[in-house]
């Protein structure tokens, strides 16, 4: 269903009226200008509560006008995605805290019904955990229950917050001392189910340890880790049933260098078994940035390269397709969210700057290739969406995108973006020559 520009503007205005506040209630600290408080609240309404009660929430709305629901669908669809969260924290003592979060996510004017679970999940229990903190040498924090997990650049473990977002039923123990810390985790990813309360994925488990050492050397932060992903019911390439264990040792280094240089490098090796198949896979990512001048505009150019191995042979007893685990992919591999860190080669060049104090703009150009043309093309969730073992080209396509984010006040942000993928020869051979277009307008309020 097409949404008119008039409806879009009317809806944005209605949200502004609902959030309207007396200008006198504005705090100067979050003010975006002399009249910034006349439209939106510029403070949290929960700031005056007793310290042992912590209330919060989030309102997010996003208009999207996509050219299809995937690279393989060219039908246009305009819709509004809404997400509302309410948080309650209770901290009876300095060392004990309880936290619960409810979430309601809906989508209006979507072409098909029901809408996908990435957009639609009516009122549900998103987080609920108990947290115990013991201060000493070292400090120990223990968190048990339904919770977000995010580590490093979130290329392997993150909430994927651009959609409804991911949580885990998990145990997380953090041990920290000085500049070093390590998280020991065990849990399962929660499946989003619009028809009932969400539950974790049966038979699939995540274990591991994720470390961090800040300023190991001048300009160097190091994050070594060892992760395990277990599945109890899988089938080998020849159809033999069994269990699976993906063992992923890796490391991420980030930091700065003289001359306003910044960098990130991450390498992950994968071994293990998948029923009777042997796992041998590799993933790596590198980013290099340069801030041209040190002023308020902060103009920065960056280049990036991402690689994840693929599997050229379907029945050789060896699985070479990299497993991306549970990532947050929106900030990587193009704004369109059409690609995952599996069987891919991705090169990016970008430019970002601050034309205004509270406005950041970023433009990128991406090239996408399959690492192995005989393996599939995987989307951002890791699902294969196209497979042509007789493909003559590995070129998926070229993508351009531009996004802007404006911090209107301490509470409210506004964003907009536009991206387009020009289909490459692989997509054309897969009978998907139309590419993909994705514009959006977003508002976000955190209380």
Image (cartoon, rainbow, N blue to C red):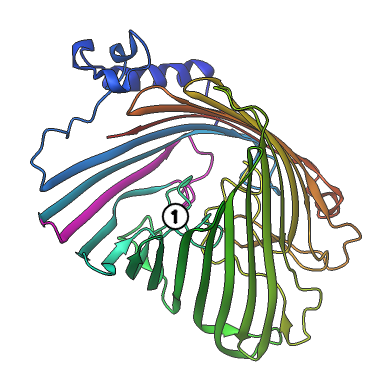
Q: How many marks?
A: 1
Provide residue 85's location: percent of width, then percent of height. Answer: 29, 43
Q: In this rendering, would 321 be left or right of 210?
A: right
Residue 117 on the magenta span: yes
Mark 1 Cα shell of 10 Å, populated few (<14), some (14-19), many (≥20):
many
Residue 239 on the magenta span: no
Quarter of the rendering occupied by the C terminus: top left
Q: Is residue 319 above or below residue 221?
A: below
Q: Residue at x 38, y 35 (%)?
A: 60
Q: In this rendering, would 189 be left or right of 124?
A: right
Q: Residue at x 19, y 48 (%)?
A: 88
Provide residue 167's location: percent of width, then percent of height. Answer: 38, 59
Q: Residue at x 30, y 47 (%)?
A: 103
Q: Residue furthest right?
A: 392
**Residue 289 image-quadrant placement:** top right
The residue that label 1 is drawn on is 159
**Residue 186 image-quadrant placement:** bottom left
Q: In this rendering, would 311 be left or right of 446?
A: right
Quarter of the rendering occupied by the N terminus: top right
């Amino acid at each position: 269903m097409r949404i008119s520009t008039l409806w879009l503007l009317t809806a944005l205005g209605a949200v502004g009226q609902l959030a309207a506040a007396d200008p006198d209630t504005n705090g100067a600290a979050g003010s975006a200008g002399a009249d910034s408080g006349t439209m939106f609240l510029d403070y949290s309404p929960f700031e005056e509560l007793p310290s042992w009660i912590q209330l919060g929430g989030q309102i997010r709305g996003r208009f999207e006008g996509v050219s299809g629901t995937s690279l393989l669908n060219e039908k246009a669809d305009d819709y509004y995605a809404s997400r509302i969260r309410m948080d309650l924290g209770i901290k009876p003592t300095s060392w004990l805290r309880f936290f619960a979060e409810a979430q309601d996510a809906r989508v209006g004017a979507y072409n098909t019904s029901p809408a996908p679970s990435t957009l639609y999940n009516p009122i549900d229990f998103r987080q609920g955990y108990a947290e115990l903190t013991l201060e000493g040498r070292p400090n120990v924090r223990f968190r048990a229950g339904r919770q977000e997990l995010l580590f490093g650049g979130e290329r392997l473990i993150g909430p994927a917050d651009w959609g409804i977002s991911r949580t885990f039923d998990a145990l997380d123990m953090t041990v920290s001392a000085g500049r070093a810390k390590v998280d020991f985790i065990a849990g399962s990813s929660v499946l989003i189910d619009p028809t009932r309360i969400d539950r974790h994925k049966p038979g699939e488990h995540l274990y591991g340890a994720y470390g961090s050492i800040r300023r190991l050397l001048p300009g160097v932060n190091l994050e070594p880790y060892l992760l395990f992903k277990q599945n109890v019911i899988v089938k080998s390439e020849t159809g033999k049933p069994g269990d699976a264990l993906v063992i992923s040792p890796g490391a991420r280094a980030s930091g700065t260098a003289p001359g306003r240089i910044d960098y990130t490098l991450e390498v992950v090796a994968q071994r293990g078994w998948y029923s009777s198949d042997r796992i041998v896979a590799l993933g790596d990512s590198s980013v290099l940035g340069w801030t041209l001048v040190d002023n308020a505009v902060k103009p920065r150019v960056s280049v990036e390269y991402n690689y994840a191995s693929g599997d050229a042979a379907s029945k050789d007893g060896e699985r070479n397709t990299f497993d991306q685990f549970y990532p947050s992919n929106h900030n990587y591999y193009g704004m369109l969210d059409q690609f995952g860190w599996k069987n891919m080669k991705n090169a990016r060049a970008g430019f970002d700057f601050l034309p205004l104090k509270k406005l950041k703009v970023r433009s990128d150009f991406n090239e996408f290739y399959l690492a192995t043309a005989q393996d599939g093309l995987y989307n951002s969730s890791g699902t294969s969406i196209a497979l042509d073992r007789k493909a003559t080209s590995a070129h998926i396509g070229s993508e351009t995108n531009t996004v802007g984010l404006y911090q209107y006040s301490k509470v409210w942000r506004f964003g907009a973006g536009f991206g387009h993928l020009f289909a490459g020869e692989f997509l054309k051979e897969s009978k998907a020559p139309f590419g993909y277009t994705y514009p959006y307008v977003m508002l976000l309020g955190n209380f």
